[in-house]
Structures are given as C-alpha cells and as structure tokens.
C-alpha cells in the first residue's frame, strides 16, 4: 500500500521582519532566494526549500529542522558570528553523528547535523 508521501520538501520559518530574515538567510546560505514575494520567500538548499513566512511568529515547541552540514564546528561558528544565539551546543550523539541548534535572529530554532551515514551533497 502506497501512502502517496514523496518525502520532505520544505521547512518554513517565521519571519515577522521579512527583509531582515531574507538578508540573514541570504548571508547564511550564500545564495539569493529563488522565490521572493512580500508574502513568502523561498531558498533552494540541496534539493529542499527553506521558506520564510512573514505571517508566522516563532513559537516554543515547534519542530526543529536539522540541515546537513559537512563541518558542524565551522558552521556553528559561522552562524554565531552572523548573529545567531546558542541554543544547544555541538554534541556528539554517537556513531560519528554531531548535532547542534541555534536560535536565528528572528527567534526560530535552526538545527544543523553532521552525519557521516548520509550521502553528502
């Protein structure tokens, strides 16, 4: 029986100040958004979409999306240097997997993961 689900495609972050969020994520990702409208901004990241929605507000207990990185320590430093706040520092969770979470300048939780078991790309 097929569920119809194709897999994850998009994660959306609250962006009450859309211009500030767009500028910050453009700097973090090193690329401009591919979709840029007053109601929504979308970035293409490794075959997935990181979206910014000005009608959402950051909330406690929302799901945390972990973005794959090749060097978690370097990315952790870069995110903090760009104005993110430490939420959960880099930690080795076993089997060579490392995770961390920052709070972006808009108040969203942004997870990063270095996982040697996933194909890099």
Image: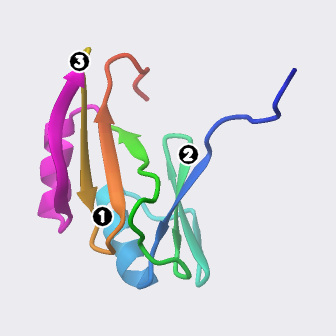
For the residues labelled 1 and 3, the Cα–Cα distance comes to 28 Å
User: Along the horizontal axis of the image, is 33 left or right of 110?
Assistant: right
Question: Would you call the spot at circle 2 few (<14 residues within 10 Å), some (14-19), or many (20 or more)?
Answer: some
User: Along the horizontal axis of the image, is 11 left or right of 16?
Assistant: right
For the residues labelled 1 and 2, the Cα–Cα distance comes to 18 Å
- The residue at the point 40 percent across, 25 percent down is 120
- The residue at the point 41 percent across, 51 percent down is 64
- The residue at the point 56 percent across, 41 percent down is 47
- For mark 1, what is the residue? 27
* Residue sticking out furthest to the right: 1
Question: Which stretch appears magenta?
Answer: 70-94
For the residues labelled 3 and 2, the Cα–Cα distance comes to 24 Å
Residue 36: which quarter of the image?
bottom right
- For mark 2, what is the residue? 48
Whether 27 is among the magenta residues is no
Instruction: Please name the colour scheme applied to the rendered image.
Output: rainbow
Q: Are marks 1 and 2 in contact (CB under 8 Å)?
A: no
Whether 84 is among the magenta residues is yes
Q: Position of residue 3 (x, y in %)?
A: 81, 31
Does 12 appear above or below 105? Answer: above
- For mark 3, what is the residue? 96
Q: Are marks 1 and 3 in contact (CB under 8 Å)?
A: no
């Amino acid at each position: 029986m097929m569920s119809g689900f194709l897999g994850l495609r998009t994660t959306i972050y609250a962006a009450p100040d859309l211009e500030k969020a767009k500028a910050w994520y453009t700097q973090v990702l090193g690329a401009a958004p591919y979709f840029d409208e007053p109601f929504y901004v979308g970035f293409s990241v490794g075959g997935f979409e990181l979206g910014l929605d000005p009608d959402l507000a950051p909330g406690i207990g929302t799901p945390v999306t972990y973005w794959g990185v090749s060097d978690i320590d370097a990315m952790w430093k870069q995110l903090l240097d760009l104005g993110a706040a430490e939420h959960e520092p880099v930690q080795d969770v076993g089997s060579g997997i490392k995770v961390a979470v920052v709070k972006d300048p808009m108040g969203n939780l942004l997870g990063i993961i270095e996982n040697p078991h996933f194909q890099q790309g």
